[in-house]
Image (spheres, rainbow, N blue to C red):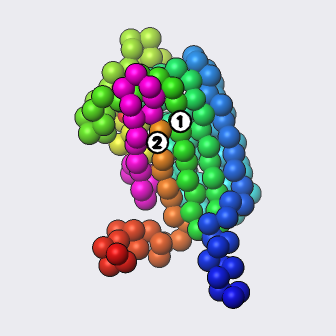
């Protein structure tokens, strides 16, 4: 019975953070990333994991500001993993495989002048995650979900997922 409880507990959020991303808000991504970093550090997570999650939060929020209208980024921390969910209302992504390629960008000129638009956000987020998934509808919006396992053994289970089917 106590084992059951432990299994349930690893999926139970111990901290959830929400960041609203409004139109043209170029400040929020940095703020969200630094608040996330602080909270994760306080929970005693490994520096490497904290850094990866902060990058995901920053890039996800920035993509909403630059490529969508508005949305929110949530960081859900459970004992076994951290999930970052970025949801927006916007134009959506017509070709996700293309968008995932390094160097592909449709960032407008104003964003490029501010130093964005290298086309590296999504590929970097994928590198920083154990699992990353994008659901998107053209003309409606995009939901991106990234999961980072907090224990190396879990990350390996994902890579060898077929063994657990
Ligand atoms: N939330 C989103 N809504 C609509 N399109 C998006 C969204 N996120 C990404 N895209 C599309 O995917 C492309 C690649 O995104 P990515 O984050 O890799 O690069 P970028 O934002 O253009 O540049 P960088 O992140 O390097 O500043 C974007 O240029 C855009 O066309
Ligand atoms: Mg980007």
Q: Identify the residue shown where x is 62% and y is 48%.
A: 75
Span highlighted in magenta in the image = 126-142
List the residue tagged with mark 2. Answer: 144
Q: Identify the residue shown where x is 40% and y is 27%.
A: 92
List the residue tagged with mark 1. Answer: 87
Ligand 1 within 8 A of label 2's CB? Answer: yes
> Are discs 1 and 2 less than 8 Å apart at CB?
yes
Residue 29, position in %: x, y?
59, 32
Q: Which mark is residue 30?
A: none
Point out the image quarter for the C terminus. Answer: bottom left
Q: Residues within 10 Å of mark 2 (few under 14, many from 20)?
A: some
Q: Is residue 139 shown to the viewer in this render?
A: yes
Q: Identify the residue shown where x is 35% and y is 42%.
A: 123
Residue 107, position in %: x, y?
38, 20
Residue 140 sits inside the magenta stretch = yes
In the image, 28: left or right of 150? right
């Amino acid at each position: 019975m106590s084992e059951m409880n432990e299994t349930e507990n690893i999926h139970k959020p111990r901290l959830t953070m929400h960041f609203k991303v409004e139109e043209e808000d170029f400040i929020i991504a940095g703020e969200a990333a630094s608040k996330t970093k602080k909270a994760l550090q306080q929970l005693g997570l490994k520096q490497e994991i904290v850094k990866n999650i902060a990058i995901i939060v920053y890039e996800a929020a920035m993509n909403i500001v630059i490529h969508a209208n508005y949305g929110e980024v949530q960081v859900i921390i459970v004992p076994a993993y951290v999930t970052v969910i970025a949801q927006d209302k916007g134009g959506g992504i017509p070709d996700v495989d293309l968008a995932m390629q390094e160097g592909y960008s449709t960032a407008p000129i104003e964003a490029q002048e501010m130093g964005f638009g290298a086309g590296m956000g999504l590929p970097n987020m994928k590198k920083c995650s154990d699992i990353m998934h994008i659901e998107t509808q053209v003309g409606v919006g995009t939901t991106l979900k990234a999961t980072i396992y907090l224990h190396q053994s879990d990350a390996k289970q994902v890579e060898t997922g077929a063994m657990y089917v």
